[in-house]
Image: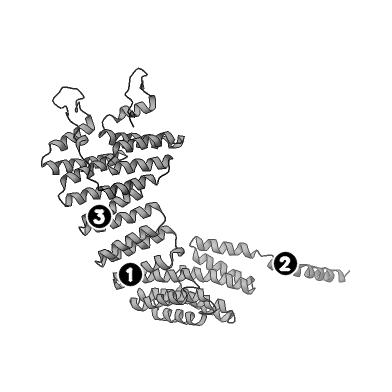
């Protein structure tokens, strides 16, 4: 009986030992790591560091220690404990001296921490050592080290030429092996020259190098930004010819129609700024022919054509070009803006306000004037816009517009494009006819837009009048008997 307590104690000890071991073995490492990372994401860095320290007491596999330590280091950095982060990095490197990739990663991050500690020369030295050591075995990390070197040299150390040299080393050494990083190096060269050295020609050359040698490294939106930067830098360098050539090169190279049109317009604007009026009009006309459905660019181009004629004191041609602008306006604000330009053109051509005021009154109120009553003092006898002649076109221009029209298919979008082309050519009746065809070819979801263009562009241009378009809309929606079913509306499309 006396042996029984001892036997029970021995049995209890045997049972308890495996349980304690089991408790340590069944800790959920992944869950604990996620908890630490969650604290980090919530910017509760002290809590994250404490959790990491606790985990390191239990999880002893090398890969676990490394994962936990990296999370801990990042929290130290984000909590501005830079000295502590530097010590942790040094300890991690010492613990795994044979792990070459880890050594590289630690060295790169060490340079980052040295930069945060404002030890800029030390950071540069650290990164240069990395770049030299792993250029063959880890080219991506070597390139990254050189890029960071360039950043510190350009900014904190204010040695932009040395920074550019570091970037150029990446662009040259890794051009084939790492094209994206090489492209990024060239981008930073361009930015360094634009921002730090203020050498706009070198900046422009770097942006052009990006577009010519690394077009596949970026999406088209980013690429168009580089083209735009090149143009801007040439302008700042007072090299207008190079700026125009760069804009035209962008128009030719890009795929997006909206981007192509925008760069075509930019080339025209640069020519206009150089007072090369005829060349500017030729450039703008090419936009109207090439991208007739890009309404913003076409509106801009036609407005600039008006301005070019005004700059040469060619008042009648400016008025004719303004009429085209008004003809092509497709929404209320566009119509209002164009009407003001037409009124200004009337004033310039006449040196008085008579036709300008009459034009505005007719477009708004029609022949009956503001009171809507025929035979009163405010009647507007003449629609002066209808008698305005479009600018004369030469044979080459006629051929250009006709070729552009012939290139479009006979479907909804094609008829729309043809309509705008005829309008900009100064043939409003033909334009209205094409918009009518677009309306007929439209699918149900396209009908509202087709009606708007047919009436606000096609019929407005054909009749030289905004007034009365409400009756055209009524005819489209309700037929010749109108909304009441008792009217006899004239067919506005007769003869188109």
Nearer the N terminus, badge 1 or badge 2?
2
Q: CA distance from mark 2 to mark 3?
A: 83 Å
Q: In which quadrant will I find the C terminus?
A: top left
| Residue occupying image coordinates x 29% and y 38% | 428
Whole-percent x, y for residue 345 in the image: 17, 43
Q: Secondary structure at mark 3?
A: helix
Judged left or right of residue 472, residue 274 is left
Residue 461 lies in quadrant: top left
Position of the N terminus, as image quadrant, is bottom right
Element assignment for label 1: helix
- Determine whether 402 is above or below 24 in the image: above
Q: Say left or right for 206 vs 15.
A: left
Residue 68 sits in quarter:
bottom right
Estimate how packed mark 2 is, as few (under 14), some (14 to 19) or many (20 or more) residues with alpha carbons within 10 Å. few
Q: Which mark is residue 22?
A: 2
In the figure, residue 248 lies in which quadrant? bottom left
Read off the residue under disc 1.
203
Relative image position of residue 285 (x, y in whole percent): 29, 50
As drawn, the label of residue 115 is: none
Numbered-mark total? 3
Query: In x, y percent, where is residue 398?
Result: 29, 46
From this viewpoint, which residue is outermost toward the right?
1
Dot 3 or dot 1: first in sequence order is 1
Q: Is residue 178 visible?
A: yes
Q: CA distance from mark 1 to mark 2?
A: 65 Å
Q: Nearer the viewer, residue 49 or 101?
A: 101
Mark 2 vs 3: CB contact within 8 A: no
Determine the residue located farthest toward the front in the rendered image.
Answer: 395
Q: What's the CA distance linking mark 3 and mark 1?
A: 27 Å
Identify the disc placed on residue 280. Answer: 3
**Residue 321 vs residue 1, the one in the foreground:** 321
Measured along the vertical axis of the image, is residue 63 above or below residue 292? below
């Amino acid at each position: 009986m006396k042996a029984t307590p001892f036997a029970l104690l021995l049995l209890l000890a045997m049972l308890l030992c495996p349980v304690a071991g089991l408790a340590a073995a069944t800790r959920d490492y992944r869950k604990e790591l996620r908890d630490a990372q969650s604290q980090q994401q919530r910017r509760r860095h002290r809590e994250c560091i404490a959790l990491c320290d606790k985990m390191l007491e239990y999880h002893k596999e090398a890969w676990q220690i490394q994962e936990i330590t990296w999370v801990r280091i990042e929290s130290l950095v984000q909590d501005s404990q830079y000295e502590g982060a530097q010590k942790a990095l040094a300890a991690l490197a010492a613990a795994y001296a044979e792990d070459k990739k880890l050594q590289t990663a630690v060295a790169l991050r060490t340079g980052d921490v040295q930069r945060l500690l404002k030890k800029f020369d030390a950071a540069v030295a650290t990164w240069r050592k990395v770049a030299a050591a792993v250029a063959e075995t880890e080219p991506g990390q070597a390139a990254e080290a050189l890029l960071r070197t360039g950043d510190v040299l350009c900014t904190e150390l204010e040695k932009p030429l040395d920074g550019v040299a570091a970037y150029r080393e990446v662009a040259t050494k890794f051009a084939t092996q790492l094209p994206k990083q090489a492209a990024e190096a060239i981008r930073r060269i361009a930015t360094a020259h634009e921002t730090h050295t203020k050498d706009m020609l070198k900046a422009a050359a770097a942006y052009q190098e990006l577009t010519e040698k690394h077009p596949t490294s970026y999406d088209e939106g980013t690429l168009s930004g580089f083209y735009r930067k090149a143009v801007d830098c040439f302008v700042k360098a007072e090299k207008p010819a190079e700026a125009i050539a760069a804009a035209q090169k962008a128009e030719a190279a890009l795929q997006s129609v909206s981007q192509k049109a925008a760069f075509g317009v930019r080339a025209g604007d640069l020519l206009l700024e150089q007072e090369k009026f005829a060349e500017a009009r030729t450039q703008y006309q090419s936009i109207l022919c090439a991208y007739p459905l890009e309404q913003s660019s076409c509106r801009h181009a036609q407005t600039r054509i008006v301005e070019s004629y005004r700059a040469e004191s060619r008042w009648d041609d400016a008025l004719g070009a303004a009429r085209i602008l008004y003809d092509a306006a497709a929404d209320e604000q566009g119509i209002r803006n164009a009407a003001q330009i037409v009124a200004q053109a009337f004033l310039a051509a006449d040196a008085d306000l008579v036709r300008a005021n009459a034009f505005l009154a007719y477009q708004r109120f029609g022949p009956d004037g503001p009171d809507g009553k025929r035979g009163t003092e405010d009647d507007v006898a003449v629609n002066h816009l209808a008698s305005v002649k479009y600018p004369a076109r030469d044979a080459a221009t006629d051929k250009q517009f006709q070729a552009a029209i012939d290139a479009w298919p006979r479907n909804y979008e094609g008829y729309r494009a043809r309509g705008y082309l005829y309008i900009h050519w100064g043939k409003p009746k033909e334009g209205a006819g094409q918009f009518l065809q677009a309306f007929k070819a439209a699918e149900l979801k396209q009908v509202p837009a087709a009606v708007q263009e047919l009436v606000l562009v096609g019929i407005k241009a054909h009749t030289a009048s905004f007034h009365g378009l409400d009756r055209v809309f009524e005819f489209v929606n309700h037929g010749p008997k109108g909304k009441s079913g008792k009217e006899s509306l004239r067919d506005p499309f007769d003869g188109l």
